[in-house]
Structure formats: structure tokens, C-alpha cells
Image (cartoon, grey):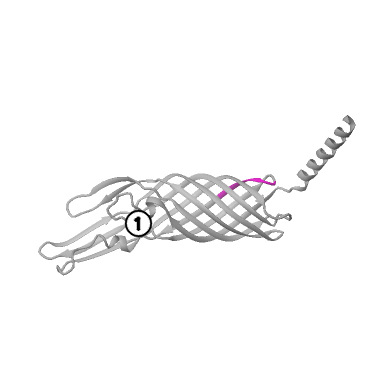
Amino acid sequence: MIKKILFLSLISLVSAVTNAQDFKKHSSITIAVGPSIPTGEFANKDFFDEKSGLADVGGYAHVGYSYQFSRFFGAVAAVSGRIHGVNKNALQTYALPTGSGSSLNLRTTTWRFLNLMGGISQTVPLTTNEKLTVELREMVGIQFSNSPEIQTSGFIPGIGSLANVQKSQAVNSLAYSLGFGVNYIVASNLGLKLFGDYQGASPAFSFTTYPADAPVEQKIKQQTSAVSLGLGVTFGF
């Protein structure tokens, strides 16, 4: 009985070593684009809520590097960018009464974000040949954020012209990303990837407006979370 147990243990050990040797460490680069959907306070369209981002659905671009150091685990790094317009309907809330002869003009730029992140990934095969896999990613890093510039100009009879500018500001903050993806290997060094990333950060902006009398400074910690979807190509090497 003891000899039989030792024999089976030896077979199991050899099998495990063989499987480990079959796995080849590899790297890959993914390039993807898609939409970015704002969530939470960032998507809030209430103009009079100072924490509202007034953000519309925007665009997303992603370049990622992955190093698979075992069959199920890897290291990942990514550079990604997002751009979101400011909702025009929300801005129209800030309007003058009709029929008064007054006029108002609002112009705005966009929210812009650049993320540099790194973390780990977990990969689970869905087919025996491992051509189709699912992937989970957890990353942390830094987000470079640019707020939109909002220019207001108009005319009120009996009062005169008015003008106000909320300047754009660039700040840095800690950011994190949680992702889920599906990978399909087309050829030995080529694949397709479909994924979704939840990206969160709360940069602190110090807005300065310039009304007619004197500048006014206002500090706001803006939540900028979004779910970004990417469809792209993976190159293995």
C-alpha cells in the first residue's frame, strides 16, 4: 500500500512539473478604444449642485501591457485617456427670463483625463485550448485631470453687459481601476479583447471665477468616476 501511494505521488509530482513547464511566460500589448460612461456625482446634471460634474458620455482610449507570469496570474500596466463634454441642457438651466430683451451666451470646453496605472490580473480559461479566456484586473495609479473652462457672456436691458469665466484647472490625484475582460486568441501572436473598466478618482479643484467686481475662489473635491468600455487588438510576444 505504501509503495502504491509513493508511486501515485510520484506520478502526480511529475505531472505537475510537466504542466508547469508547458506554460510559457509571455507579454502582450493591447490597443483599444470605446465609449466612457460617467457615473455618480460626475454624471449628475444638477447645475446648482457644486459637486455635479455635468458630464456627458465621452470617448476612451487605452494602451496596456500585460506580463503573464503563471497560467492564471499576471502583472498589468496601462495608459488611458478619457474626454467628456459638459451637458448643454444642464447649462441652459442657467438662463435669463425670455421676453425681457436679455441675451446669454455660454461656451464650455471638455473634461480631460490621463491615467497611468499598474496592478495585477487573474485569467481563467473558458475553453480547453485556452483560446477564449476571461480576465479580472485591479490597478492603482495617478490621474491627471483637466476641468472644463466655462465662459458666460450676456446683456440685460437697464443693467448692461455681463461676463464671467470659470478657468480650466489641471490637478493630479490618486486613482484606481477595476476591470473585467474577455480575450480571444485569433493567431499565435494576435488576439481580440473586449473589456470594461470602472475608473475612480476624486481630484481637488480650486476654481476661480472672474465676475465684474473681483475674482472669487472656490475649492471643490470632484468625483470623476466612469465605466469605460474598450474593444481592441492584442499583440503577443
Q: Position of residue 160 (x, y in %)?
A: 13, 63
Q: Nearer the viewer, residue 71 or 114?
A: 71
How many badges with numbers are in the image? 1
Q: Quadrant of the C terminus?
A: bottom right
Q: Secondary structure at mark 1?
A: loop
- In this view, the residue farthest toward the left is 158
Q: Is residue 40 left or right of 60 when viewed as pictured?
A: left
At x 67%, y 54%, the residue is 126
* Most common SS among magenta residues: strand
User: What residue is shown at x 23% (from left), y 53% (from top)?
Assistant: 210
Q: Which residue is mark 1?
A: 54
| Residue 28 rendering spot, x and y as whole percentages | 64, 53
Mark 1: amino acid: Leu
The N terminus, quarter of image? top right
Q: Position of residue 142 (x, y in %)?
A: 47, 45
- Classify residue 141 as left or right of residue 96: right
Q: Residues within 10 Å of mark 1 (few under 14, many from 20)?
A: many
Q: Position of residue 163 (x, y in %)?
A: 21, 59
Q: In the picture, residue 192 is in which quadrant?
A: bottom right
Q: Is residue 171 above or below residue 13?
A: below
Place residue 91 in its image quadrant. bottom left
**Where does the magenta region start and end?**
71-77
Q: Vertical placement of 191 versus 121: above or below?
A: below
Q: Is residue 213 left or right of residue 83?
A: left
